[in-house]
Image: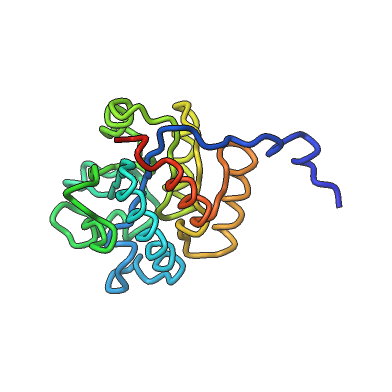
Amino acid sequence: MTDAFADATYGALDVGYGDRPAVLVVDFQKGFTDPDFRMGKSPRIHAARDRTVTVLEVARRCNIPVVSCFAGWHTKKDIQYWKVAAVREDFFDGSEEQHIDPKIADPNYDFIFKKCAPSIFFQTPIMPFLTKHRIDTVIVTGCVTSGCVRASTIDAFSYGFRTIVVDDCCGDPMQESHDANLKDMGRRYADIKQSADVLEYFEKMRGKNA
């Protein structure tokens, strides 16, 4: 069967890894990872979080910067017109849903901040941090693959970073949605890798970001 995208050269080139990586962790907060909450019941997201824990442990050991964000709002006046009820009703300052999953966060190492839109880049302090550390490659993990991960990937690409999305460290409520969005991002903006490949890359980078 003919692949019209491949025929049009989508996905024909690789992005490749650079020399100064950082890990971006998108919205692994309790609202998405804790089954006590409405959006926190997906086993796919739980599994992606658990695999991301290992990636972060190796990244920190290799002195690779880690950036972690969570979604939230101060009041109802701050919220965009989300079509997701739990996002609009539950993610306010002071809520448990805003808290970064304790398996993920290392407050003594990670750069952590709140965001108010899908992308980790939209009106956040991430760019000065990445510039300070002379980052050329971003390793994207988090949830939800079809939403905030995708938005963050497109912005990372748009800002000129080599963008790597870690398949098994991203979670989505539906496997079909996860697969379709990764496939499309891989055609256009990013290399799609597994965590084992990223860990091998990190070990090669050990000491270079000191």
Residue 193: % across, % down: 55, 50
Residue at horizontal 38%, vertical 44%?
Answer: 23
On the rendered structure, is 197 left or right of 27? right
Residue 138, relative to residue 177: is it above or below?
above
Image quarter of the C terminus: top left
Q: In the rendered image, which quarter is residue 4 located in?
A: top right
Residue nearest the viewer, comparing 104 with 120: 104
Q: In the rendered image, which quarter is residue 156 located in?
A: top left
Q: In the rendered image, which quarter is residue 12 located in?
A: top right
Residue 123: % across, % down: 30, 32
Residue 162: % across, % down: 50, 33
Residue 43: % across, % down: 43, 72
Residue nearest the viewer, comparing 49 with 106: 106
Residue 160, relative to residue 31: is it above or below?
above
How many dots with numbers? 0
Residue at horizontal 32%, vertical 26%?
Answer: 131
Q: Residue furthest right?
A: 1
On the rendered structure, is 30 left or right of 154? left
Residue nearest the viewer, comparing 54 with 169: 54
Residue at horizontal 57%, vertical 50%?
Answer: 182
Residue nearest the viewer, comparing 84 with 164: 164
Residue at horizontal 33%, vertical 65%?
Answer: 33
How is the rendered protein coloured?
A: rainbow
